[in-house]
Image (tube, coloured by chain):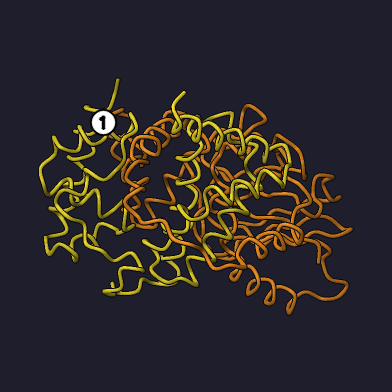
Chain colours: A orange, B yellow
Amino acid sequence: MIPENSEELHVLAGEYVLGVLDADDADEVAAALATNAELRRAVAFWEDHLHPLSSLAAAAEPPPATWQAIEARIRATAPKPVAQSFWNSLALWRWSTAGFAAAAAALALWIAVTPAPGPSFVAVLHPPQQDQASWVATAGRSGLVVRAVTAAAPPGDRAFELWAIAPGATRPRSLGVIPPGGELKLSPLPPDLRDGATLAISVEPLGGSPTQQPTGPVVFVGSVKAV
Amino acid sequence: MDSQTAALSSVAALIEAVGRGSQAALKRLYELESKRLYGIALRIVRRPEIATDVLQETFLQIWQHAAAFSTERGAGAAWLTGIVRFRALDAVRKAGREVPSDDPALGDEALEPDVIEKIGASAEAEALRRCLKLLDQEQQRCILLAFVDGLSHSEVAERIKAPLGSVKSWIRRGLLSLRRCLEP
């Protein structure tokens, strides 16, 4: 529960920046950053003001080959950074590398139970700050299927809405509200679904966001990969 | 512009250049900032091989997300510090934490009572020092352990041998006083 009271909000943001919150509370803050501008400002306040404390950690020389390793990893991944103001501003990306091991495990399970011809794209969605695989999306010529792999339900008077961001796009596009059963099928394949796209699930009013854009916290996120 | 301001603004300018896709700017940023960021990571994760991974992840994230920097934030060094601290805290949650050794090269020097005299001479550091001095000793100690060593509530409690509830309350009250003091 993110407090509305400004003083409480700043305490929570301070605890988040210090890193003392337990994983669940930290996740909740990370997810709320997507939609709560005052929380974002409060986190920035503490990051800026507490920053001088970081000088108490003595600087140290990293191992010699570290830069070469970074260069190699940059070559192996994205060709160049792309301005994606919506997603970048969410601060989601700080957590977006989490989930790879869980993704691999969920994927192996999925592929084992899916008859050939297999899907051509997959995404494993996880909470922004955890690597717990929560939804698996598979897509191919016949369309897109998104299924919950863990029990996850929105709060009583809310719904989960699925969003896609095409690579390089700046705004998410709604793929629809996920039915209470936790499975959404779309056919034909939405055009935004391709390698390097992002899928996300936000909490919205029943029936979906009234604005064509997410209005509630983003609670699950994952990258679309070609297989 | 004094030399420190110049150094800070050049970090911000480099991040913006990285955001436009300059790998040369990223390399320069690495030359300028990697020792500082590696030191922060090492202090939190305590193992050189994990700190090295954290540093790599940090620079990948800078590369991928520098375009978001200029829109919301002013202080480049603080932005970088935020990234490396979150990555280090994430690594600690996943891998578990090594118990402190006595090797000062691994960043295990104890926090001394007058440690806040050592946080630098910039205007930001002066303001923070002045405000930290208004806190009770317990509040100050808990906040420093959490930020610098990356300890959670319960790890702080264990380290200073105090009840968890007291630690939570000291940090909470310390943050409230700090905010009142730091706000313009």
> Is residue A77 left or right of B179 when viewed as pictured?
right
User: As displayed, is residue B58 above or below residue A84?
Assistant: below
Q: Residue at position x 48%, y 39% from top?
A: A33
Q: Which residue appears at 55% of the width and 54% of the height?
A: B58
Residue A6, how many percent across, how many down?
31, 27
x 77%, y 44%: residue: A166
Residue visible at 37% across and 51% down? A25
Please, what is the three-letter code of the amino acid marked with disc 1? Arg
Residue B94: x %, y % from top left: 45, 68
Rendering quarter of residue A223: bottom right
Q: Nearer the viewer, residue B117 or A200?
A: B117
Q: Mark 1 falls within which chain? A: B
Q: Name the residue nearer the viewer: A207 or B183.
A: B183
Query: For the view shown, which residue lies furthest in the bottom direction?
Result: A112
Vertical placement of residue A119 versus A185, above or below: below
Work out which residue is located at the far front of the displayed protein and give it.
Answer: B3
Q: Position of residue B8 (x, y in %)?
A: 49, 34
Most distant residue in the top direction: B184
Residue count near mark 1 (Cα–Cα under 10 Å), binned few <14, some 14–19, many ≥20 = some
Q: Is residue A120 left or right of residue B147?
A: right
Count of numbered badges drawn on the protein? 1
Residue B135, image quadrant? top left
**In the image, residue A218 lies at what x, y percent?**
55, 44
Instruction: Write down the residue under mark 1.
Output: B179
**Placement of the C terminus of chain B among the 4 image quadrants:** top left
Does dot 1 land on a helix, a strand or a loop?
Answer: helix
